[in-house]
Image (cartoon, coloured by chain):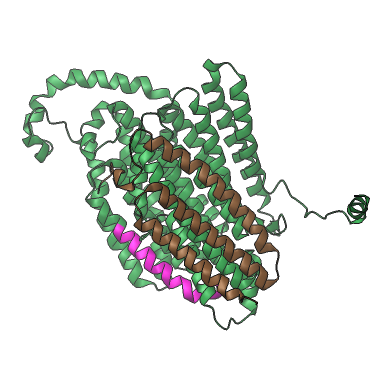
């Protein structure tokens, strides 16, 4: 016994790597904030716990946003980009770009969820906590320089999301989509992890910097293990960004999840997947560029085409938006396929505009569900929305047109830039597919965007076919009373936080669509992986 | 008798494939769940084998991360499975049929 103590005493103290807490401050704020919300909301009286947890949660997201913006200004100085925490986490413009993006999305989701989540009073606290934790995982994914840290971020993000999807009480659809998401998410994580193990075996490290150094300096005699590992990592992340052929879970999950959660998932989970994909392939596997770039091109082409074609035949609004988001993922992949700084910059710009649009769009769908008093809005249900809820109809149309890439919205430049990047890298076939898929997509976007302006057919089936008809104008006087009633419902809900979210998304989409310069230059500056 | 490292790699690849096969062919959600765990454990075996072959302790520490994450996944996954199948008699994936198209 005394020998053991002497042994312990004589050994030199353990050396820990220096930890720069400021570099991972946004993640820490999210995690500590989530715990604080949990504590405080359980200490305050029951009737104010909802208000307290939402307010505190939004504050946490705001503080994280402020810190991310502070880090963004810091990272402007030369030499500010560095690897911290023993090389496991990066503090660079790329990571900070995603910190800002994720903080904004978390804030918007909390505000939208306050009105639109159908929860018991106590469970709104859980919603807040899970959104914050999930965001911290996404941030970790964007800044990870080590494949295992990336995996941890991925799981923190995903496991919180599985619960968020299943949270609503009395929502069987939510639970069913949760189990599908969980099963396929777990499966894809396992594939991703096996890829990590194979890459570790082939290169002797899970650190992206060391993987790069190894691959750049050594000529591998047989690279089968490495290629298999790279392929499996691509498949695993492909599931997360719902790229074809790993997209099949997305429509079910997007349709069944509560609308604010769907928006959160479509923005954060997808952006985190793309951040990880960019980081891993552009800073780790770049010496094997000729092996994986063509693969990304094929996936991008199929993703754009399949997403657009399958969206045309859908009847449910959220399901259509899910296929639309698959289509958008293809466009973002197109920027990666261009394999140039310009292409990646275009992808990042696409990601940030897409995230704002999709959060706003799903919040709008959630608000429409509330106005119509039913979950699962069909495209046909949108008829006459412009009279019932003019603001919602206007926002819905704007955000849909932005996804279609209409001029004067952020969507136009986003699509234009990625296609331009692909063309300038001489990837003509895939650029052509992109334009064809954009044209197909315009069809279903317009079908959805025009529906709110069509009048409701009153008793007459024929007018449902013909849209506007004389018959409807005859019933004009009759329905005016109804319309007045429903406008007052709309007016009552005008000042809630979900409306603020929708309005913010619309203003950003149109405002930055017209005044686009700053955001594009920010996105281009966030590219430093070359 | 010494066993070459590649045998372990082949074994873990087989286990991983078995898990993937089970995941796609079995209809019982719990069995699919177990297949997923089998895949994760195959990954662990791969990590340990490579760690031994490379003489690098890093690979063995990674196994702990994987184990912890797998445990967290089990907790959440079983919770969801119980929530959805509490009111049904069997836990087969064919019952999950709200969504079509």
> Which residue is depicted at the point 36% across and 57% down?
B24
Q: Is residue A323 above or below residue B81?
A: below
> Which residue is depicted at the point 62% across and 39% down?
A31
Residue A124 location, x and y as percent?
49, 28
**Chain A painted colour:** green
Q: Is residue A432 left or right of residue B45?
A: left
Residue A196 location, x and y as percent?
56, 63
Part of the protein shown in magenta: A286-306
Question: Observer-nearest residue: A71 or A276?
Answer: A276
Q: Is residue A287 magenta?
A: yes
Q: Is residue A269 left or right of residue A244?
A: right
Q: Is residue A134 above or below residue A33?
A: below
**Can residue A515 be seen from the camera position used here?**
no
Quadrant in which residue A369 is drawn: top left
Q: Quadrant of the C terminus of chain A?
A: bottom right
> Which residue is depicted at the point 71% across and 54% down?
A85
Q: Is residue A304 magenta?
A: yes
Main secondary structure found in the magenta portion = helix
Quadrant in which residue A468 is drawn: top left
> Which residue is depicted at the point 46% across and 52% down?
B34
Question: Observer-nearest residue: A153 or A456?
Answer: A153
Q: Is residue A33 left or right of residue B81?
A: right
**Can residue A376 be seen from the camera position used here?**
yes
**Chain B painted colour:** brown
Question: Observer-nearest residue: A21 or A407?
Answer: A21
Residue B64 location, x and y as percent?
64, 54
Q: Is residue B2 above or below residue A451?
A: below
How many callouts does the rendering have? 0
């Amino acid at each position: 016994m005394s020998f053991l103590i002497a042994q312990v005493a004589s050994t030199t103290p353990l050396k820990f790597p220096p930890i720069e807490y400021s570099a991972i401050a946004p993640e820490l704020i999210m995690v500590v904030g989530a715990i604080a919300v949990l504590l405080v909301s359980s200490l305050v009286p029951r009737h104010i716990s909802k208000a307290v947890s939402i307010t505190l949660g939004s504050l946490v997201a705001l503080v994280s946003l402020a810190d991310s913006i502070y880090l963004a200004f810091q990272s402007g100085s030369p030499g500010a980009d560095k690897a911290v925490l023993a090389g496991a986490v990066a503090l660079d413009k790329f990571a900070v770009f995603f910190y800002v993006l994720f903080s904004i999305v978390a804030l918007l989701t909390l505000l939208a969820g306050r009105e639109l989540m159908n929860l018991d009073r106590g469970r709104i606290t859980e919603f807040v906590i899970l959104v914050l934790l999930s965001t911290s995982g996404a941030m970790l994914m964007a800044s990870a320089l080590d494949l295992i840290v990336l995996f941890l971020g991925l799981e923190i993000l995903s496991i919180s999301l599985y619960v968020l999807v299943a949270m609503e009480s009395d929502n069987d659809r939510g639970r069913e989509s949760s189990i599908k998401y969980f099963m396929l998410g777990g499966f894809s994580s396992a594939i991703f992890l096996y890829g990590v193990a194979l890459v570790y075996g082939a290169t002797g490290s899970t650190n992206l910097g060391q993987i790069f150094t190894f691959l750049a300096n050594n000529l591998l005699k047989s690279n089968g293990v490495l290629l298999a590992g790279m392929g499996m990592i691509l498949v695993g992340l492909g599931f997360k960004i719902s790229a074809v052929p790993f997209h099949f879970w997305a429509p079910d999950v997007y349709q069944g999840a509560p609308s604010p959660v769907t928006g959160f998932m479509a923005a954060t989970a997808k952006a985190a997947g793309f951040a990880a994909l960019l980081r891993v392939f552009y800073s780790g596997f770049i010496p094997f560029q000729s092996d994986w770039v063509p693969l990304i091109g094929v996936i991008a082409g199929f993703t754009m085409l399949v997403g657009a074609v399958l969206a045309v035949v859908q009847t449910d609004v959220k399901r259509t938006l899910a296929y639309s988001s698959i289509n958008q993922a293809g466009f973002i992949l197109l920027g990666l396929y261009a394999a140039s700084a310009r292409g990646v910059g275009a992808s990042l710009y696409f990601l940030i505009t897409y995230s704002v649009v999709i959060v706003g769009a799903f919040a709008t769908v959630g608000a429409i569900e509330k106005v119509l008093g039913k979950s699962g809005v069909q495209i046909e249900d949108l008829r006459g929305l412009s009279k019932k809820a003019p603001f919602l109809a206007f926002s819905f149309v704007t955000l849909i047109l932005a996804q279609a890439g209409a001029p004067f919205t952020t969507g136009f430049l986003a699509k234009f830039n990625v296609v331009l990047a692909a063309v300038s890298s001489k990837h003509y076939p895939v650029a052509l597919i992109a334009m064809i898929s954009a044209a197909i997509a315009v069809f279903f976007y317009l079908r959805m965007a025009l529906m709110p302006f069509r009048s409701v057919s009153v008793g007459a089936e024929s007018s449902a076919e013909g849209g506007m008809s004389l018959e409807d104008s005859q019933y004009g006087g009759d329905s005016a009373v109804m319309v007045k009633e429903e406008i007052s419902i709309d007016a009552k809900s005008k000042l809630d936080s979900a409306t603020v979210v929708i309005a913010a998304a619309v203003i950003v989409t149109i405002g930055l669509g017209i005044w686009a310069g700053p955001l594009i230059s920010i996105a281009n500056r966030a590219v430093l992986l070359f | 008798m010494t066993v070459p490292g590649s045998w372990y790699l082949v074994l873990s690849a087989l286990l991983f494939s078995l898990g993937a096969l089970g995941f796609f062919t079995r209809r019982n959600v719990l069995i699919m769940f177990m297949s997923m765990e089998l895949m994760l454990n195959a990954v662990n075996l791969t990590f340990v084998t490579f760690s031994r072959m490379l003489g690098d302790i890093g690979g063995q520490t990674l196994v702990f991360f994987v184990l912890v994450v797998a445990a967290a996944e089990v907790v959440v996954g079983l919770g969801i499975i119980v929530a959805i199948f509490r009111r049904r008699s069997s836990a087969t994936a064919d019952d999950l049929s709200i969504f079509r198209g």
